[in-house]
Image (spheres, rainbow, N blue to C red):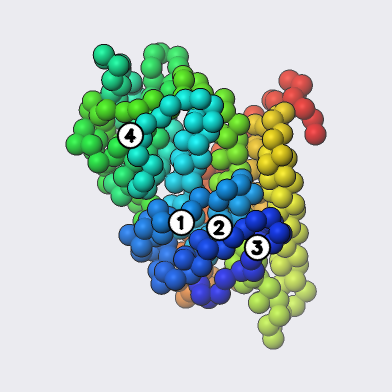
């Protein structure tokens, strides 16, 4: 599998969906010799491209980027998500006076024994505490960060990561996948921050579900070159029925996941809001199953050789295995089952 071979465009949508911005962004990505591994060049590309004007275009860009390099998509996704959140806040009537230039992340994870608290004094908000799982905090310029305004409520804040009151840790990070996308804690000691929305708005807004499926689009796009590797093996001189079975399983799983992503993009793009969270959770579950099926079929069909002899292939597998763990497996399925059992919209 050659890292220089790019998949067809578009992947998810049709060419009449107004994808000029996506095409321009991908053309710029293709000009980077080490997309994903050269973090400086990748971040410069992320900052320099135009954000797609539609949700459909955003998912197309994420999937197409991941098909080129999984780590590059992992860098791009939170940047686009942050800009989308700022747009959503403005549309909801929240004034957010921040400079949108630069590279952005979204830090919303919580962890045992650590918490970021927000304090307001004379109209100025400051953040205090430790935030876990802050991807690329040492390399980005800004982030949207959730912080506790009291014991029960969280609010979103825009934070300048270059503030001397912010310290980005370098680890622990012993990852073999997404090695350059360091996700470690940050310590905040009174850094000034700008509120984005009211308490609870970050999780209530429709864009929260949209962003979750955007991550799934990255997973799906990242698995496509593994399907190509399986197809190449199935055409080889030593191909047998089993090689075609492995390809067939991966192909049908990814095809079904693509259908779900396309339908979900259509529903969300049309403004559908009923059971938005449930629809997003289902889409993520379908996609992660397809990706894990593809990873397993590729491992069984191709054996250890590409994992030890093909750098691009081995890195893609390792990156995907780390990335899909943003899905919480059985716990996320239990949440879907609970929602349906309690009367959420069935279909």
To which residue does mark 2 refer? Answer: 21
In this rendering, position of residue 332 left or right of residue 246: left
Q: In this rendering, which labeled residue sits more in front, label 3 or label 1?
A: 1
Please report contact status of discs 2 and 4: CB closer than 8 Å, yes or no: no
- Quadrant where the image shows the C terminus: top right
* First-in-chain label (2 vs 1): 2
Query: From this viewpoint, is residue 296 visible?
Result: no
Q: Residue furthest right?
A: 347
Who's the residue at 33% across and 59% down the image? Answer: 40
Determine which of the numbered discs, if any, sits on residue 10 in the image: 3
Q: Position of residue 176 (x, y in %)?
A: 40, 57
Does residue 75 sit above or below 156 in this rendering? below
- Quadrant where the image shows the N terminus: bottom right
Q: Residues within 10 Å of mark 4 (few under 14, many from 20)?
A: many
Q: Residues within 10 Å of mark 2 (few under 14, many from 20)?
A: some
Q: Residues within 10 Å of mark 1 (few under 14, many from 20)?
A: some
> Distance of mark 2 from mark 1, alpha carbons?
8 Å
Front residue of this view, candidates 85 and 186: 85
* First-in-chain label (2 vs 4): 2
Query: From this viewpoint, is residue 164 visible?
Result: yes
To which residue does mark 1 refer? Answer: 49
In this rendering, position of residue 241 left or right of residue 50: right
Who's the residue at 72% across and 62% down the image? Answer: 251
To which residue does mark 4 refer? Answer: 159
């Amino acid at each position: 599998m050659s890292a220089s071979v790019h998949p067809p465009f578009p992947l998810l949508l049709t060419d009449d969906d107004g994808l000029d911005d996506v095409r321009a962004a991908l053309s710029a990505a293709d000009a980077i010799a080490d997309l994903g591994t050269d973090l400086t060049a990748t971040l410069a590309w992320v900052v320099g491209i135009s954000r797609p004007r539609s949700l459909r275009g955003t998912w197309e860009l994420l999937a197409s980027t991941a098909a080129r390099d999984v780590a590059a998509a992992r860098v791009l996704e939170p940047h686009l998500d942050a800009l989308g959140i700022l747009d959503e806040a403005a549309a909801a009537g929240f004034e957010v006076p921040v400079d949108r230039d630069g590279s952005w992340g979204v830090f919303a994870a919580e962890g045992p024994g650590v918490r970021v608290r927000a304090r307001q004094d004379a109209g100025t908000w400051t953040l205090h505490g430790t935030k876990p799982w802050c991807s690329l905090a040492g390399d980005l310029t800004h982030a949207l960060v959730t912080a506790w305004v009291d014991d029960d409520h969280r609010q979103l804040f825009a934070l300048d990561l270059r503030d001397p009151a912010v310290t980005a840790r370098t680890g622990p990070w012993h990852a073999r996948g997404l090695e350059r996308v360091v996700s470690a804690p940050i310590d905040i000691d009174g850094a000034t921050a700008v509120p984005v929305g009211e308490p609870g708005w970050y999780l209530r807004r429709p864009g929260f579900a949209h962003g979750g499926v955007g991550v799934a689009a990255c997973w799906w796009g990242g698995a496509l070159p593994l399907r190509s590797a399986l197809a190449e093996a199935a055409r080889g001189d030593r191909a047998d029925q089993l090689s075609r079975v492995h390809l067939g399983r991966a192909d049908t799983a990814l095809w079904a996941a693509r259908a779900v992503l396309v339908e979900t993009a259509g529903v969300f793009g049309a403004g559908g809001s009923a059971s938005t969270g449930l629809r997003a959770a289902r889409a993520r579950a379908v996609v992660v199953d397809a990706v894990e099926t593809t990873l397993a079929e590729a491992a069984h069909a191709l054996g250890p050789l590409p994992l030890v002899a093909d750098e691009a292939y081995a890195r893609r597998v390792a990156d995907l295995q780390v990335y899909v763990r943003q899905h919480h497996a059985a716990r996320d399925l239990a949440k879907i089952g609970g929602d349906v059992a309690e009367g959420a919209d069935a279909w």
